[in-house]
């Protein structure tokens, strides 16, 4: 493939020109919608899930599903290990890597703590950048070059948006990554660490769980990453997530000081955050995003037996919107749930409609586990970015959180983009997110950051439809070395 594109540059540019037109028209027609379609394949480019494995995936080309993989069973006595302790590792974890610029992976099973402070465990998957291919050679080897070996690692939160334990990123990322952000971080030479922040029960939207799992993944991975070539004497750690991913990154940032005071985090990047699950679910309902209302209600009740019992009692036993159809989402990826429930009024599944959703049995767990800003103040420099016209979560909710943290001494740069909606900002904000991480991890970045205190900046950055081009365009096609993938 690479050879073909290199040999046919003018032909390719022509093809790309046509694609751009398609991309643009699809973008325009998708305005106001929350799910874009890939103009090349027609595939839904929702921002919440990775696709399912190919139907013909063979057992030895891909790791088995977590539910069928004994490696995911923590060893006896794990409960008494300290949070962040490594319980098990596997080097060269993925038989097949479908993420650009990654040369190898390793996985760590580690001890963490769930939303109710019970002992739990989870898995982190670490992607090693291609630029590290000589970094585990003896330092005396002529090919070893310390200055080409990274000291930067980013805990990257994939928006899995699923209530299915088999949709954990550690498994699904074998097939591909959702948006190319991992590819771009790897191109900058950073290790990319992806925690299964929903934990073994797939507690989507359980914020405390997600924060703990991210912080413990960071502790566990940093304790062994030196063996894999990360330069531990000057290591720097960043957090990054958008939308569902921002949910996990934000909870990690606000819980860091109390839960993991030993962990030094050099940056957190929080894009398109949804500070209050009640607000965002009501906005996502009855639209193409309704599936995420279903998965969030399932996810938030995984660790809450009373709320789960209430939910099961209030679901219609029969009729078109019944309990079987609702619980069906426990075996769907986020993307599958978006397809299955698109446009539905999720409250139709409840015997008392929206009143059941508003019942304290549901609202109490949301208010304690799925509302940001109530569990501490980020103790690291942070970059927030959000579209002013984010249709899923009002920008003022994020502004209120930023203001609250700032009044308590936080260091935050907040970019409010006057253009675009929720999904546009995922792409439009990416370069700024990478530059912020670069500034904090590498010491240089094309972005103005307040040294201390806070700064809110209104930016006007249009969606560049080039961003919607697929991976190969940036890595093997004419985009190689340009823009996102090659920068910095
Ligand atoms: C699996 O199916 C895809 C698409 O149908 C095809 O491109 C690919 O070559 C197949 N892989 C194997 C190993 O058969
Ligand atoms: C579980 O894994 C085994 C191989 O280890 C395979 O034969 C079996 O089909 C798998 N079952 C499921 C449900 O995936
Ligand atoms: C988890 O914690 C809750 C509340 O602290 C407790 O009631 C429950 O029994 C614990 N569950 C387990 C499995 O330890
Ligand atoms: C690793 O070393 C080999 C042999 O010296 C060299 O060809 C290759 O470019 C090096 N890789 C990197 C990423 O520097
Ligand atoms: C070592 O890596 C640095 C940074 O990538 C590069 O500038 C330098 O040329 C490399 N040195 C050798 C001897 O390859
Ligand atoms: C979350 O938002 C809802 C309205 O959307 C509000 O009723 C609730 O009080 C909020 N929760 C918190 C903890 O602020
Ligand atoms: C539950 O809903 C599904 C999907 O609408 C429907 O096919 C099924 O018949 C319903 N079951 C009952 C018992 O009504
Ligand atoms: C469960 O989901 C599958 C896949 O989307 C669908 O084919 C099936 O009809 C669903 N069952 C119910 C009861 O809704
Ligand atoms: C955000 O704005 C809406 C509508 O203007 C208002 O109802 C809501 O209370 C505001 N929320 C915050 C946190 O300021
Ligand atoms: C730095 O960013 C500004 C605005 O975001 C942009 O106009 C400029 O081209 C960038 N410079 C470099 C060297 O990337």
Image: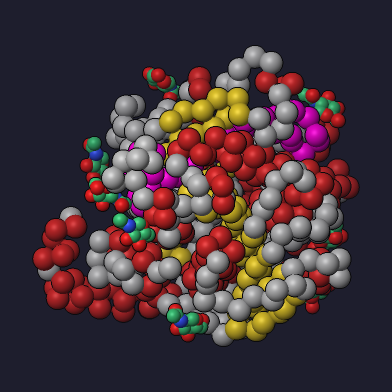
Q: Position of residue 431 (x, y in %)?
A: 49, 71
Residue extending farthest to the right is 360
Numbered range of the magenta stretch:
110-137
Q: Nearer the viewer, residue 355 or 260?
A: 260
Relative placement, left or right, of 156 versus 482 is right
Give the residue displayed 49% in from the left and 42% down from the top.
Answer: 126
The C terminus: image quadrant: bottom left
Relative placement, left or right, of 274 versus 439 is right
- Above or below — where is 340 with respect to 398? above
Instruction: Report if residue 97 lies within the magenta region.
Output: no
- State the image quarter where residue 119 is shown: top right
Q: Position of residue 103 (x, y in %)?
A: 35, 44
- Above or below — where is 33 with respect to 161? below
Give the residue displayed 31% in from the left and 79% down from the top.
Answer: 21
User: Whereabouts is ligand 6, in terms of quadrant?
Assistant: bottom right
Relative placement, left or right, of 213 versus 421 is right
The N terminus: image quadrant: bottom left
Residue extending farthest to the top is 76
Give the residue displayed 69% in from the left and 50% down from the top.
Answer: 264
Q: Position of residue 5 (x, y in %)?
A: 17, 64
């Amino acid at each position: 493939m690479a050879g073909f594109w290199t040999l046919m540059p003018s032909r390719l540019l022509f093809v790309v020109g046509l694609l751009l037109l398609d991309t643009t028209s699809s973008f325009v027609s998708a305005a106001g919608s929350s799910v874009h379609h890939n103009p090349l394949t027609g595939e839904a480019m929702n921002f919440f899930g990775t696709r399912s494995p190919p139907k013909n995936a063979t057992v030895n080309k891909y790791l088995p599903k977590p539910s069928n993989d004994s490696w995911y069973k923590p060893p006896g006595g794990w409960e008494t290990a300290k949070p962040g302790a490594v319980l098990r590792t596997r080097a060269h974890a993925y038989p097949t890597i479908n993420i650009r610029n990654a040369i190898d992976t390793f996985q760590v099973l580690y001890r963490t703590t769930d939303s109710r402070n019970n002992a739990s465990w989870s898995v982190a998957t670490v992607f090693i950048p291609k630029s590290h291919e000589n970094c585990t050679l003896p330092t005396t080897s002529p090919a070893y070059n310390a200055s080409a070996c990274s000291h930067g690692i980013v805990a990257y939160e994939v928006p899995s948006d699923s209530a299915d334990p088999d949709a954990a990123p550690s498994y699904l990322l074998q097939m591909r990554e959702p948006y190319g952000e991992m590819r771009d971080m790897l191109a900058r030479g950073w290790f990319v660490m992806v925690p299964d922040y929903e934990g073994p029960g797939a507690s989507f939207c359980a914020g405390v769980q997600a924060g703990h799992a991210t912080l413990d993944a960071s502790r566990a991975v940093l304790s062994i990453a030196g063996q894999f070539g990360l330069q531990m004497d000057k290591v720097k750690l960043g957090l990054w997530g958008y939308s569902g991913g921002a949910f996990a990154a934000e909870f990690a940032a606000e819980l860091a000081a109390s839960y993991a005071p030993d962990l030094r985090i050099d940056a957190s990047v929080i894009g398109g955050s949804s500070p209050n699950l009640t607000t965002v679910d009501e906005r996502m309902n009855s639209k193409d995003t309704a599936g995420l209302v279903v998965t969030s209600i399932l996810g938030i009740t995984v660790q809450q037996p009373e709320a789960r019992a209430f939910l099961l009692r209030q679901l219609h036993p029969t009729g078109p919107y019944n309990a079987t159809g609702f619980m069906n989402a426990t075996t769907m990826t986020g993307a599958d749930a978006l397809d299955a429930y698109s446009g539905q009024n999720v409250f139709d599944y409840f015997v008392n409609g929206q009143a059941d959703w508003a019942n304290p049995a549901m609202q109490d767990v949301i208010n304690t586990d799925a509302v940001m800003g109530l569990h501490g103040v980020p103790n690291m420099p942070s970059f927030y970015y959000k579209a002013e016209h984010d249709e899923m979560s009002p920008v003022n909710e994020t502004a209120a959180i930023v203001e609250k943290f700032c009044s308590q001494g936080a260091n935050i740069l907040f970019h409010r983009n006057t253009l675009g909606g929720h999904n546009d900002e995922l792409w439009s904000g990416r370069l700024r997110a990478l530059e912020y991480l670069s500034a904090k991890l590498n010491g240089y970045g094309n972005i103005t950051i307040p040294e201390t205190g806070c700064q809110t900046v209104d930016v006007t950055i249009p969606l560049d439809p080039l961003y919607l081009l697929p991976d190969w365009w940036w890595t093997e096609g004419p985009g190689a070395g340009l823009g996102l993938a090659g920068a910095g």
